[in-house]
């Protein structure tokens, strides 16, 4: 018996959310934890999954997998579940992982739940807690089938170093040509930036910043905090910032330790994207901004005055 | 070309979420229901494609009980030609995907939102694609049809990718794929007489069962810091909140 974990890599590094998935699989205590990685990845990086609780790591090094094709990934993981005698597949929610998980669930006749936020309660069946209504509520869902596929929301488990590196096991598998049913012709990605869905600290700006040319003071603070930068919907609609930075109901949902909102009034649609944050700081010159009601700390003041002072205070505290 | 648009009937984004009957039922008191905002983008793109390509037909499908018919009529008023309502409570992604797949054969393009804003599963498109054995992609921000080929832009973490695939295919949509459309008076009038077929659901084995719902714990009181003492915020974040 084993639990399979699909491991995603970004810019050569295993994603932190995938390490959380390994920690989650380990905590299930349902057998060996077998990590699976696809495409060109350094062996040293892959072997590090052992430190987080994986007992084995399978690697399909085929270069055709460097550009992820959802259908191919789903077939490989389905085969790996059979070969490893795994009843459970765990992975992190992502633009790749979630659809792959859904397809594996159908191929293996598994019960599937996404947005899982906590370890299961096994006292009465296999019941997991998941986030619904865009973070405004939770549901407890029983997975009835013997096979189970879980897609985790960030922070569902804590990635901690508990062991040592392990040797990488090459996994030879014949890829089915028919599975290459989509072709990625170009990928445009902001490199070197901290990915918003994974960021531990997020600094977001709204219309209170008055224009894209003023984003420098926000980026200075983000840099000092090693934070990702986000924005409100109006800012992305106006084209001041790219859509992938839009935090909210119809944009990216973040779950950082610390969320700092600057010049954002706090429409309910924006709150839906940030309500999984541990601590929320709101900076707004309007003392009546609704965001203050959802915040842990607040400063009433002008962004152009507060931001440079805050950046200086952060730097001074290092 | 035949386009199927799958729409969810969900609480307005400003709704206050509550549960009744000991956390087992969603409280609909005072809640206004709408076409899922992402599904609304999918519908708008479908109507654009219909307007640009003569002979294109747009069918909407909803899995829901009788109360969803006003939402379906709105989709017809926006410009869909006909509708199917599968008479069942949409309890989970696999159930919904199985019902859609049952009616999706013969369509060239199956569009829906990237996720419903009630359960946020975000996988119905992938499941429908898998059940039908055709490609599925989400979240799609741009979609152009070029003969039998579809060119799409898909959002990924920190950027986007350009992807191509052949028809038929399934796409989960999000902004800015199209501008939301508001029904006009003529659309509202004609929607009343457009065909809305009600069918009973296909029997599907339950793979998941929701046991109960719960609200998150209430947020504590806010602590205000003077604009003249910004450094205090950094101190509090370090020593009190322990997030720095």
Image: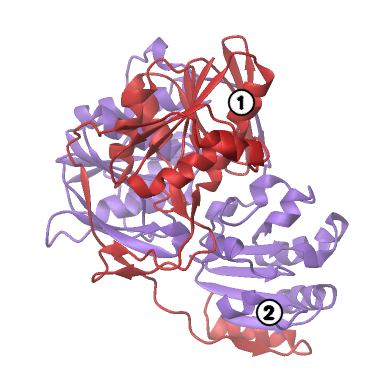
What tint does the image give chain A?
A: purple
Name the residue at 67% across, 57% down.
A230
Q: Chain of mark 1?
A: B
Q: Which residue is mark 1?
A: B152
Q: Residue visible at 80% across and 51% down?
A: A240
Quadrant showing the C terminus of chain B = bottom right
Mark drawn on residue A317: 2
The image shows residue A69 at horizontal and vertical percentages of: 47, 25
* Discs 2 and 1 share one subunit: no
Please name whichever residue, A52 or A274, is drawn nearer the observer in this view of the structure.
Answer: A274
**Residue A116's quadrant in the figure?**
bottom left
Residue A37 visible in the snapshot: no
Instruction: Specify the colour of chain B.
Output: red
Which quarter of the picture shows residue A303?
A: bottom right
Please state which of the two labelled residues, at mark 2 or mark 1, is closer to the viewer.
1
C-alpha distance separating marks 2 and 1: 46 Å
From this view, report whether residue B35 is shown above or below residue B98.
below
Marks counted in the figure total 2
For the residue labelled by badge 1, is the local secondary structure a helix, a strand or a loop?
strand
């Amino acid at each position: 018996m084993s639990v399979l974990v699909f491991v995603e890599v970004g810019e050569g590094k295993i994603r932190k959310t995938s390490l959380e998935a390994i920690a989650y699989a380990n905590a299930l205590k349902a057998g060996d934890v077998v990590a699976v990685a696809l495409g060109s990845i350094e062996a040293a990086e892959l072997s590090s999954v052992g430190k987080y609780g994986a007992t084995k790591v399978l690697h399909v090094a085929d270069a055709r997998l460097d550009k992820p094709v959802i259908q191919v990934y789903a077939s490989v993981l389905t085969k790996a579940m059979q070969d490893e005698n795994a009843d459970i597949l765990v992975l992190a929610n992502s633009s790749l992982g979630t659809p792959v998980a859904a397809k594996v669930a159908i191929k293996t006749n598994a019960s599937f739940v996404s947005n899982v936020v906590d370890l299961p309660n096994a006292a009465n069946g296999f019941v997991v807690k998941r986030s619904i209504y865009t973070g405004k509520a939770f549901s407890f869902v029983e997975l009835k089938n013997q096979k189970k596929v879980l897609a985790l929301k960030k922070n569902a488990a804590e990635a901690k170093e508990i062991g040592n590196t392990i040797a990488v096991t090459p996994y030879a598998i014949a890829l089915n040509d028919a599975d290459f049913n989509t072709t990625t012709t170009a990928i445009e990605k902001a490199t070197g930036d901290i990915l918003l869905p994974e960021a531990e600290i997020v600094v977001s700006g709204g219309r209170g910043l008055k224009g894209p040319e003023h984003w420098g003071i926000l980026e200075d603070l983000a840099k000092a905090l090693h934070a990702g930068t986000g924005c409100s919907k109006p800012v992305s609609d106006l084209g001041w910032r790219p859509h992938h930075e839009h935090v909210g109901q119809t944009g990216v949902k973040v779950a950082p330790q610390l969320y700092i909102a600057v010049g954002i009034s706090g429409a309910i649609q924006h709150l839906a994207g940030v309500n999984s944050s541990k601590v929320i700081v709101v900076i707004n010159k309007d003392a009546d901004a609704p965001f203050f009601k959802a915040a842990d700390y607040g400063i009433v003041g002008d962004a152009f005055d507060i931001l440079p002072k805050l950046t200086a205070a952060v730097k001074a505290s290092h | 070309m035949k386009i199927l648009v799958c729409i969810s009937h969900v609480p307005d984004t400003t709704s206050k979420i509550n549960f009744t009957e000991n956390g087992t039922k969603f409280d609909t008191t005072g809640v206004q229901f709408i076409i899922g905002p992402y599904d609304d983008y999918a519908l708008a793109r479908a109507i654009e494609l219909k307007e640009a390509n003569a002979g294109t037909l747009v069918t909407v499908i909803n899995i829901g009980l009788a109360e969803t018919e006003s939402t379906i009529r709105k989709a017809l008023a926006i410009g869909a030609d006909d509708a199917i309502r599968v008479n069942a409570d949409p309890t989970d992604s696999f159930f919904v995907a199985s019902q859609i797949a049952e009616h999706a054969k013969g369509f060239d393009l199956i569009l829906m939102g990237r996720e419903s804003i009630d359960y946020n599963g975000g996988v119905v498109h992938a499941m429908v694609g898998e059940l039908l054995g055709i490609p599925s992609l989400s979240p799609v921000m741009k979609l152009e049809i070029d003969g039998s080929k579809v060119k799409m832009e898909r959002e990924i973490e920190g950027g986007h990718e350009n992807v191509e695939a052949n028809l038929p295919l399934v796409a989960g949509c999000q902004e800015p794929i199209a501008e939301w459309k508001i029904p006009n008076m003529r659309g509202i009038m004609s929607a009343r007489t457009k065909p809305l077929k009600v069918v009973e659901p296909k029997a599907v084995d339950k793979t998941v069962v929701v046991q109960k719902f719960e609200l998150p714990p209430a947020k504590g009181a806010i602590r205000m810091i003077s604009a003249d003492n910004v450094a205090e915020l950094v101190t509090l974040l370090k020593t009190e909140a322990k997030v720095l």
